[in-house]
Amino acid sequence: MFTGIVEEVGTIRSIRKGAHSCILTVGASLVLDDVHVGDSIATNGVCLTVTSFDTGSFSADVMHETLNRSSLGALKVGSKVNLERAMAANGRFGGHIVSGHIDGVGTIQKLRADDNAVWYTVGADRSLLRHVIEKGSITIDGISLTVAGVTDTSFSVSVIPHTRAVTSLSGKGVGDVVNLETDVIGKYVERLLSVGAIDSSGGLFGGPVEPSTSQQGTSPSGLTREFLIKYGF
């Protein structure tokens, strides 16, 4: 798990391409402190597993699915990437819950200066935007940001100078593709509503539950206000 607080900006040193995969070698320094083979490092928001490392870089395999779902396939030697190690159990939770599992990509549509901040408007598919809410959290290339506005086709964030200075966002412009991870809580809530409630035996989620017509506030999935209260929501 990650927080979306970028630790450093690394540089792509090499890309060894396979038929449908690749091996990335990333130049870095801070994230290599106490690194081990098998550790997770978020690279532009994508959780990658360290397969080898030396004093100035680490390598990771990128599988077919990851290339299809993210912008990693567009990286070139010299590209800048945001890096974050997995959150330590005794660390501060400065951002929000970030899994490192990219939901899809967006395209920067507009940049607008606003005093000391810069507004980024990012276009995305509606399947992603349904999980984006104003004042909620969004991860862009591994950066935890607050959503300032949402439309049917895009969302906007306001980025402070510090964030631009310590991440790769300062080098991004209109037309650039970015990795997006929406708030994991919203995805679980949607799944809960679409699959149905816990069965009467207290087991795991099963198939759709027949809606009750006798309980006020029942959703089509059978989820009720009473159920949510009972289980602590």
Image: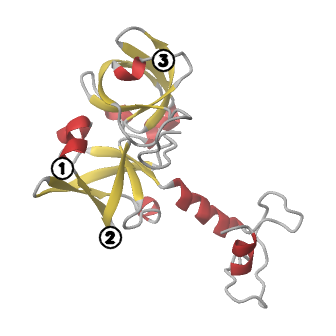
Residue at 18% from the left image edge and 38% from the top image edge: 171
Give percent across and percent down for residue 154: 31, 63
In the depicted structure, whether residue 101 falls above or below residue 215: above
Mark 1 = which residue?
Answer: 174
Mark 3 = which residue?
Answer: 35
Q: Are marks 2 and 3 in contact (CB under 8 Å)?
A: no
Name the side, left or right, on which 225 lies relative to 13: right
Q: Quadrant of residue 43?
A: top left
Please tell me whether mark 3 sits on a helix, a strand or a loop.
loop
Give how far apart the Cα atoms at labels 3 and 1 are: 35 Å
In the depicted structure, whether residue 74 falls above or below residue 184: above
Residue at 47% from the left image edge and 62% from the top image edge: 131
The amino acid type, in three-letter code, at marker 2 is Thr
The amino acid type, in three-letter code, at marker 1 is Val
Mark 2 = which residue?
Answer: 151
Name the side, left or right, on which 153 lies relative to 1: left
Q: Quadrant of residue 212?
A: bottom right
Can the viewer see residue 11? yes
Looking at the image, tell me whether mark 2 or mark 1 is earlier in sequence order. Answer: 2
Can the viewer see residue 18? no
Residue at 34% from the left image edge and 61% from the top image edge: 147
Q: Residues within 10 Å of mark 2 (few under 14, many from 20)?
A: few
Give how far apart the Cα atoms at labels 2 and 1 are: 18 Å
Farthest-out residue, top: 54
Name the side, left or right, on which 165 lies relative to 194: left
